[in-house]
Amino acid sequence: MHANPDASAQQLKQIIERVERLDDEELGIKADRRDVLAEAKAVGFDVKTVRAIIALRKMNPEMRREAEDILETYKSALGID
Amino acid sequence: MHANPDASAQQLKQIIERVERLDDEELGIKADRRDVLAEAKAVGFDVKTVRAIIALRKMNPEMRREAEDILETYKSALGID
């Protein structure tokens, strides 16, 4: 902290305002993503499947195979065909 | 959807890549926020309290008073001094 309380308050305000700007940017990005997915839906794509594909693309092939194997094991254990 | 499957696949790919770019931007913003808060901590501010202040500043005075009243009521109900 600063020896000078005013300088410290000023520094705190700057930090808080930087975080708030980042929060605003994040809200903007979330709104943009909603818009892209709404557009996908409007042209006839299934949004739930688009999201699933995006999740699959974040995995490498090995992770993907492992995730699929575990899913199959659990489905089988629960008698889900 | 398109009558032409290749055009449809291309359009799907573009949509997915737009979402992925937004996801990457969001990760960047989250990293920036972590950096700002790490900097706040490094100069001696209490990060938990900084986060609490940011949450308070997102509320208008009426919402803030109401949230404080509810918190007081619950604390009182549970004997938290």
Image (spheres, coloured by chain):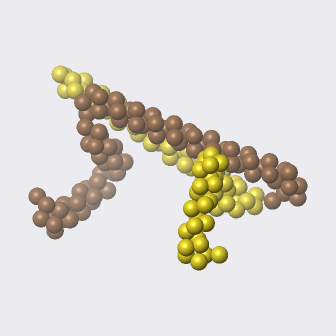
Chain colours: A brown, B yellow
Horizontal side of residue B21 vs A74, given as left or right? right
Q: Quadrant of the C terminus of chain A?
A: bottom left
Residue at the image point whose x is 59% and y is 50% from the top: B63
Task: Name the spot of residue A7 as percent of width and height, x first.
Answer: 84, 50
Task: Name the spot of residue B12 as percent of width and height, x first.
Answer: 29, 32
Horizontal side of residue B32 vs B9, given as left or right? right
Residue at the image point whose x is 88% and y is 58% from the top: A3
Horizontal side of residue A67 vs B65, given as left or right? left
Seen from the viewer's position, the closer of residues A52 and B52 is: B52
| Residue B3 sits above or below residue B37 on the image | above
Seen from the viewer's position, the closer of residues B57 and A68 is: B57
- Residue A4 seen in the current view: yes
Which quadrant would residue A38 be assigned to in this image? Answer: top left
Residue at the image point whose x is 55% and y is 49% from the top: B30
Which quadrant would residue B47 be assigned to in this image? Answer: bottom right
Residue at the image point whose x is 29% and y is 46% from the top: A52
- Residue B47 seen in the current view: no
Seen from the viewer's position, the closer of residues A48 and B80 is: B80
Q: Quadrant of the N terminus of chain A?
A: bottom right
- All told, the count of numbered labels is 0
| Residue sitting at the far right | A4
| Residue sitting at the far bottom | B79
Task: Name the spot of residue B65 as percent of width and height, x first.
Answer: 63, 54
| Residue B3 sits above or below residue A17 on the image | above
